[in-house]
Image: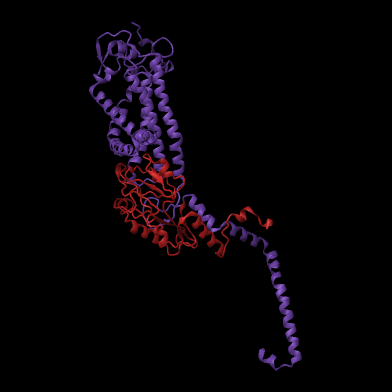
Chain colours: A red, B purple
């Protein structure tokens, strides 16, 4: 079985936010909720780098570990999904997640947040595939349609890759070997001093 | 130049060609060698440049900044949207799912076992000589406040414990759907009951401070653990040493509980994740500790000691109870001794008639 992964190539991402827009449109997520976002470091400075980030579908997912109602589950494809019928909106997954993936439609006094929403790798939720209930709660189930996540499909520079981890890694490895300029084996020079050359 | 060369004789042209080729070869061999000259001349400069190049590999710096939680720019608005990776979550997860659950859970079980052992070994602490005469111990306001805080505290405890231990203890019993329904109710009840609880709890803590100032005889009470060690019943005023210590744990634990709870209750005020993680740990730890000591309080205030509960229910206690457990207060009420507030001096033996 495939193990689904995201990979964002920082050398290619141009911070167009096409992935963010594509995701929001495809799943019609509520106002204020963004399942994906692009973060730029050193914005406006030469050498700035951007990364598109969403739920990374961790193997040992922190959100699932801290959820008081145990609403998370991992599919056979390695996609981390959650059951909104069980979710109580406590926000613990948001405290635990390194990537800031869990989103809440509300953020009000007395801890009112609403049901958590996050990237589903376009794989929907526990409801029947492509049912109206699934579409309403989790957005479109492209995986069930045999398609990959729309964010990566739409990426104009193909910086964002989504799919089986082995294939994603092969594509990235191929890019690195063909890519000119500075070698990307950073740390190599630190490990092996010039005298060893 | 070329025009001139063309007009020359073939012999001279060949010579020029030879010289050109020779010069070209010489240059081709010599030019790379100039690198050594440049290298030797500017050795220090060249080296520092190399080191700089190694140090500022933009990729390694980028990922280092990411791992350190450096905030960048994101077109998406939201709390900490510019932070690519926050590291605190993993620490919070490990503390919550590790020591917090284990130590907290063990503490509650240990207290329950201690109560059970005490009750089985020592039994109920009976009144030596009930008199049938009553004296007023708790006024109506004190009693109302106590039960108000007590009942809200118990509801908050059950709902709070459900969120921490429910996944391990209640899901096997109720199933995921059943427990989620309970948690769905627990969370808002816990959140909305918090403020009414705080109002009563803070008021109770403030107005009961004067009664709970520790006196020298209270330390003697604590040393004998309220009479468990030794034969004589230690002396006590309106509140005994144990009750006073319980009060002060409630006081300081309660402040931690209320302040951390305030943070957790109002995510809309813009707290970031690190404050929420810290608040959650402080809130859970202080809550668990207060629940643990409250279990002891509930036991001693009900089936553990005869004659104590009626003081908080009807307001009156038996004179025999007062004499046995709060002898200094009994003397004070009967006009035998001065009020406890004036007995700050170490020597209080004068205020203990044995009759």
Q: Is residue A6 above or below residue B98?
A: below
Q: Quadrant of residue B341?
A: top left
| Number of residue marks | 0
- Give the residue drawn at x 46%, y 51%: A1
- The residue lying toward the viewer, choosing from B216 and B220, is B220
- For the residue pair A193 and A52, the one nearer the viewer reads as A52
Residue A179 in picture, x, y percent from top left: 55, 64
Quarter of the image with the C terminus of chain B is top left
The residue sitting at the top extreme is B355
| Horizontal side, residue B154 vs residue A77: left or right | left
Q: Would you say B283 lies left or right of A109 here?
A: right
Name which residue lies at 44% across and 49% down. A78
Depicted A43 relative to depicted B274: above or below = below
Q: Is residue B6 visible?
A: yes
Q: Quadrant of the N terminus of chain B?
A: bottom right
**Quarter of the figure with residue A31:** bottom left
x and y percent of residue A178 in the render?
Answer: 55, 64
Q: Nearer the viewer, residue B69 or A70?
A: A70
């Amino acid at each position: 079985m495939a193990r689904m992964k995201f990979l964002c190539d920082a050398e290619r991402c141009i911070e167009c936010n096409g992935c963010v827009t594509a995701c929001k449109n495809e799943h019609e997520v509520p106002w204020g909720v963004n399942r994906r976002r692009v973060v730029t470091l050193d914005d406006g400075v030469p050498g700035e780098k951007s990364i598109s980030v969403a739920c990374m579908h961790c193997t040992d997912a922190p959100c699932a570990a801290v959820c008081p109602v145990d609403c998370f589950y991992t599919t056979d494809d390695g996609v981390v999904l959650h059951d909104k019928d069980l979710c109580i909106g406590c926000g613990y997954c948001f405290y635990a997640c390194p990537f800031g993936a869990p989103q809440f439609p509300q953020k009000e006094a007395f801890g009112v947040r609403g049901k958590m929403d996050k990237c589903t790798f376009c794989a929907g939720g526990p409801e029947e595939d492509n049912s109206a209930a699934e579409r309403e709660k989790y957005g479109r189930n492209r995986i069930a349609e045999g398609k990959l996540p729309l964010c990566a499909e739409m990426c104009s520079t193909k910086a964002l890759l989504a799919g089986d981890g082995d294939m994603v890694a092969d594509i990235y490895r191929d890019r690195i070997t063909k890519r000119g300029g500075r070698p990307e084996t950073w740390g190599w020079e630190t490990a092996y001093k010039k005298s060893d050359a | 130049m070329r025009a001139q060369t063309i007009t020359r004789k073939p012999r001279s042209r060949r010579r020029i060609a030879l010289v050109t080729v020779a010069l070209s070869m010489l240059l081709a061999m010599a030019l790379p060698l100039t690198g050594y000259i440049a290298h030797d001349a500017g050795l220090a400069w060249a080296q520092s440049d190399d080191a700089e190049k190694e140090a500022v590999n933009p990729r390694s710096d980028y990922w280092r900044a990411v791992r350190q939680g450096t905030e960048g720019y994101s077109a998406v608005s939201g709390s900490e949207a510019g932070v690519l990776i926050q590291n605190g979550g993993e620490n919070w997860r490990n503390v919550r799912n590790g020591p917090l659950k284990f130590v907290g859970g063990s503490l509650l079980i240990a207290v329950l076992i201690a109560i059970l052992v005490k009750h089985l070994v020592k039994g109920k602490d009976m009144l030596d000589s009930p008199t049938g005469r009553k004296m007023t111990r708790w006024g109506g306001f004190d009693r109302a406040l106590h039960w108000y805080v007590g009942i809200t505290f118990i509801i908050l405890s059950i709902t709070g414990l459900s969120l921490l231990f429910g996944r391990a203890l209640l899901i096997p019993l109720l199933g995921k759907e059943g427990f989620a329904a309970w948690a769905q109710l627990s969370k808002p009840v816990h959140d909305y009951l918090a403020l009414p609880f705080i109002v009563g709890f803070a008021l109770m803590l403030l107005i009961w401070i004067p009664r709970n100032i520790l006196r020298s005889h209270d330390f003697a009470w604590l040393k004998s653990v309220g009479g468990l060690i030794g034969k004589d019943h230690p002396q006590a005023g309106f509140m005994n040493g144990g009750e006073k210590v319980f009060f002060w744990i409630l006081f300081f634990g309660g402040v931690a509980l209320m302040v951390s709870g305030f943070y957790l209750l109002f995510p809309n005020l813009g707290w970031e994740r690190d404050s929420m993680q810290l608040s959650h740990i402080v809130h859970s730890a202080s809550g668990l500790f207060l629940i643990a000591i409250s279990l002891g309080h509930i036991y001693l205030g009900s089936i553990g000691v005869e004659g104590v509960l009626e003081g908080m229910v009807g307001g009156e206690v038996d004179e025999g109870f007062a004499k046995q457990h709060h002898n200094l207060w009994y003397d004070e009420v009967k006009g035998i001794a001065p009020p406890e507030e004036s007995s700050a001096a170490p020597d209080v033996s004068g205020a203990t008639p044995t009759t």
